[in-house]
Image (cartoon, rainbow, N blue to C red):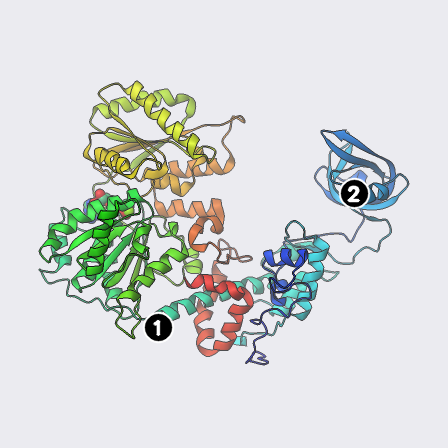
């Protein structure tokens, strides 16, 4: 059994009686305490879990004569020369002779006291990276100590830190925290990870390596000490998500259980009116959603499917089920263009069917005229608007739903936690007195989440996957073309356009400047209009255009009266014009992989063979950077969204890949999803057992690892 002392006051969870350095915010914190808090180091346990990122070997002295370029060495010797010089910058250069050779020590921001310390004749120990070989060795900003200082017996831990928090100060704070932190075993023996040490043993081993412990052992992430740390970290993440899931399962949502097979149901009439049959994957997702909606606990489902897999129809079918049960549905998209596309499509599908019931689809955005907006808001409030589509405006305070039961969020990763919470809050307004209701939530994403990531960061979600594209799609041919061949590309597209095709030409964000960005797209529009002649109509789309103008351009392009659409990345998500069969992306090397894949997904939606041309520039070096090369290669090699997502995760790492959903949420610090899949499986198995059988230990495990940050995961 785990030692459970003072269960009424779990020491891990308590706010600081801290490591003697940190104090609660506002209580006269000093600079060191502030820096520590920025690093997330407040409670003793936070310090204990702030593990070294690497180790240094200060146990030995080396000889300069044996040091190679790039080696980090520690030598002792005598200063033979020292002067302050101005070479581009003011610097102090001292020469140290260790008997085997000499090295130039260079310091930039030095104090007068340092200058004194480095005076000729001083006997010093210096430690740093050696640059250069026989032409003359240099060491930039080495660490300096008096010669003869006792050498440590063991390897020295190095912690990640921030400016203003020197390594020795942090090291002392960590030691103090480690000594005080309650590290009692929380896991009953049967639930401990195999082949791993106890947490206390593991942390001591990693913070205080014994003299006989080799560098290789400490750096080996499969060492039993690291295994325990990683297992504990993954377990607490699984636990907190399981808690979130259970909390949600205790909530109530409207039960949406109309008989969709009734021929007069909206669901059945929508299916009958469609010009195509749903794919097997769409039908499956629809069934999974139907089962969720019929339960009293709120749905929390992610619908993931590659671009063009037909998520909109699944959303429409879910909305129809909700409306059939007598409730309202809201669909929120991150951009106005995308929301407008959804609106266009869903109005076309549903409005004629809804009219018979005196219902309609409503449209809400921030840029709407006040009068129209008020009319729409009134329709939402009265319940006449059975489906409401829009941007963030949908969650504005002014919008009150009569009986919202289903919220659909497209491109969910583009919304923050707060926005999703606001949407969920909207159903409360429709609740019966004394009965708080949550809406069912369907999130959609065109960026599939690789399995390990889904298991760790999205463990609280149910997932439906559209793994099948609608029939009749032709594969998109992707080509890399160097920028100097841009004119040839323009020649080629002329031929395509002559056959009645339409195309996108996407200009990048250059230097993060909207102004430059805009000029770039505008100039390209003019250039293409010139080059392609009068018969070809070239339009322009960018985010700073007034909404009405944007909509007019999109409408012209959809109708085929515009042939070429020059655009910034505003068309990245969701835009659907099946006749467009060619996509040119300029400066493709600057785009992220998922973004390129999304852009490419704008074509290949009709029967015509489609192509995507990635124009890349090499810059001054004459080469494309390594990460950019990996992205472009992936684009040419695969059009499979899951494979793209996997590679994107590999290139960017989970932090950036997850984006908005995780903003502020704790990312894994020690476990690595690409190598620790088995530990992750273990954590997933153990979490429910611990939570069910040892709820207090489970809670302490979460508090210990996530502290107050655990809250972020609940959204
Ligand atoms: P995404 O998943 O990228 O949001 P969309 O919902 O925009 O994809 O669908 C892409 C295109 O495929 C749309 O034109 C849509 O009408 C069409 N579509 C959707 N489902 C089917 C289907 N089962 N058969 C044929 N075409 C379909
Ligand atoms: Mg879509």
Q: Position of residue 46 (x, y in %)?
A: 60, 64
Examine the image and state in which quarter residue 202 appears: bottom right
Residue in the image at 37% along x and 60% along y: 421
Q: Look at the numbered disc 2 and give the secondary structure of its residue.
A: loop
Residue 111 disc label: 2
Say which element carries label 1: loop
Determine if residue 48 is in view.
yes
In front: 586, or 407? 407
- Residue plotted at (14% across, 51% down): 351
Q: Residues within 10 Å of mark 1 (few under 14, many from 20)?
A: few
Please indicate whether residue 34 sits to the left or right of residue 687 in the image. Answer: right
Residue 438, numbered label: none
* Number of other residues with Cα within 10 Å of mark 2, as a class: few under 14, some 14 to 19, many 20 or more: few
- The location of residue 594, given as percent across then percent down, is 39, 43
Q: Quadrant of residue 402?
A: bottom left
Picture residue at 11% right of the left edge, 55% below the top: 269
Q: In this rendered view, identify the residue nearer to me: 645 or 697.
A: 697
Q: Does residue 394 sit above or below 708 in this rendering?
A: above
Task: Name the residue: 55% across, 80% down.
Answer: 7
Report the residue marked by disc 1: 250
- Asked if disc 1 and disc 2 are in contact, CB closer than 8 Å, the reply is no
User: What is the number of callouts on the image?
Assistant: 2
Whether residue 370 sits left or right of residue 207 in the image: it is left
């Amino acid at each position: 059994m785990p030692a459970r002392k003072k269960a009424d006051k779990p020491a891990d969870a308590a706010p600081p009686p801290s490591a003697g350095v940190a104090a609660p915010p506002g209580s006269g914190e000093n600079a060191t305490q502030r820096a520590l808090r920025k690093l997330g180091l407040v409670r003793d346990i936070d310090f204990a879990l702030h593990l070294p990122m690497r180790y240094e070997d200060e146990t030995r002295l080396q000889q300069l004569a044996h040091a190679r370029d790039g080696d980090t060495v520690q030598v002792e010797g005598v200063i033979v020369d020292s002067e302050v010089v101005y070479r581009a910058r003011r610097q102090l250069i001292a020469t140290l002779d260790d008997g085997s050779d000499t090295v130039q020590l260079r310091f930039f921001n030095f104090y007068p006291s340092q200058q004194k310390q480095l005076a000729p004749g001083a006997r010093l120990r210096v430690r740093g990276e050696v640059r250069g070989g026989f032409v003359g060795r240099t060491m930039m900003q080495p660490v300096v100590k008096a010669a003869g200082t006792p050498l440590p017996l063991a390897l020295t831990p190095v912690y990640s830190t921030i400016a203003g928090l020197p390594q020795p100060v942090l090291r002392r704070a960590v030691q103090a925290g480690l000594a005080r932190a309650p590290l009692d075993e929380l896991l009953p023996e049967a639930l401990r990870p195999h082949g791993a040490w106890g947490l206390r043993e593991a942390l001591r081993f990693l913070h205080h390596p014994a003299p006989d412990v080799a560098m290789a052992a400490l750096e080996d992430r499969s060492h039993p000490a690291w295994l325990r740390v990683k297992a504990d970290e993954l377990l607490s993440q699984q636990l907190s998500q399981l808690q979130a899931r259970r909390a949600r399962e205790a909530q109530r949502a409207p039960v949406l259980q109309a008989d969709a097979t009734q021929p007069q149901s909206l669901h059945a009439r929508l299916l009958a009116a469609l010009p195509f049959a749903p794919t097997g994957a769409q039908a499956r997702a629809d069934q999974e959603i139907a089962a969720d909606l019929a339960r009293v606990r709120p749905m929390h489902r992610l619908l993931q499917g590659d671009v063009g897999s037909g998520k909109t129809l699944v959303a429409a079918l879910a909305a129809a089920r909700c409306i059939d049960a007598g409730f309202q549905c809201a669909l929120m998209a991150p951009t106005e263009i995308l929301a407008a596309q959804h609106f266009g499509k869903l109005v076309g599908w549903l409005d004629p069917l809804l009219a018979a019931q005196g219902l309609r689809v409503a449209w809400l955005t921030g840029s709407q005229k006040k009068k129209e907006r008020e009319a729409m808001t009134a329709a939402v409030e009265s319940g006449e608007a059975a489906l409401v589509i829009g941007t963030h405006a949908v969650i504005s305070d002014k919008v009150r739903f009569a009986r919202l039961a289903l919220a659909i969020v497209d491109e969910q990763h583009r919304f923050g936690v707060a926005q999703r919470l606001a949407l969920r809050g909207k159903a409360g307004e429709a609740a019966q007195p004394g009965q708080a209701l949550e809406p069912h939530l369907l999130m959609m994403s065109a960026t599939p989440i690789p399995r390990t990531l889904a298991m760790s960061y999205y463990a609280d979600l149910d997932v439906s996957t559209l793994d099948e594209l609608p029939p009749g799609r032709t594969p998109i041919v992707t080509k890399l073309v160097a920028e100097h061949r841009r004119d040839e590309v323009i020649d080629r597209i002329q031929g395509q356009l002559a056959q009645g095709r339409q195309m996108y030409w996407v200009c990048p964000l250059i230097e993060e400047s909207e102004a430059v960005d805009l000029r770039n797209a505008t100039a390209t529009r003019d250039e293409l209009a010139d080059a392609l002649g009068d018969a070809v109509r070239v339009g322009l789309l960018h985010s700073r255009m007034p909404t009405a103008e944007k909509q007019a351009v999109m409408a012209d392009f959809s109708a085929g009266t515009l042939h070429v659409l020059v655009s910034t990345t505003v068309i990245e998500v969701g835009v659907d014009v099946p006749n467009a069969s060619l996509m040119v992306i300029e400066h493709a090397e600057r785009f992220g992989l998922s973004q390129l894949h999304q852009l490419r997904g704008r074509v290949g939606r009709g029967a015509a063979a489609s192509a995507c041309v990635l124009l890349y520039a090499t810059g001054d070096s004459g080469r494309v950077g390594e990460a950019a090369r990996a992205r472009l290669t992936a684009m040419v090699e695969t059009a499979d969204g899951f494979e793209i997502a996997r590679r994107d995760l590999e290139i960017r790492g989970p932090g950036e890949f997850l984006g908005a959903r995780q903003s502020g949420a704790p990312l894994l610090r020690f476990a690595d999803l690409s190598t620790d899949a088995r530990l992750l499986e273990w954590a997933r198995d153990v979490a429910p057992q611990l939570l069910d059988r040892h709820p207090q230990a489970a809670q302490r495990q979460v508090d210990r690892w996530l502290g107050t940050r655990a809250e972020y995961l609940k959204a």
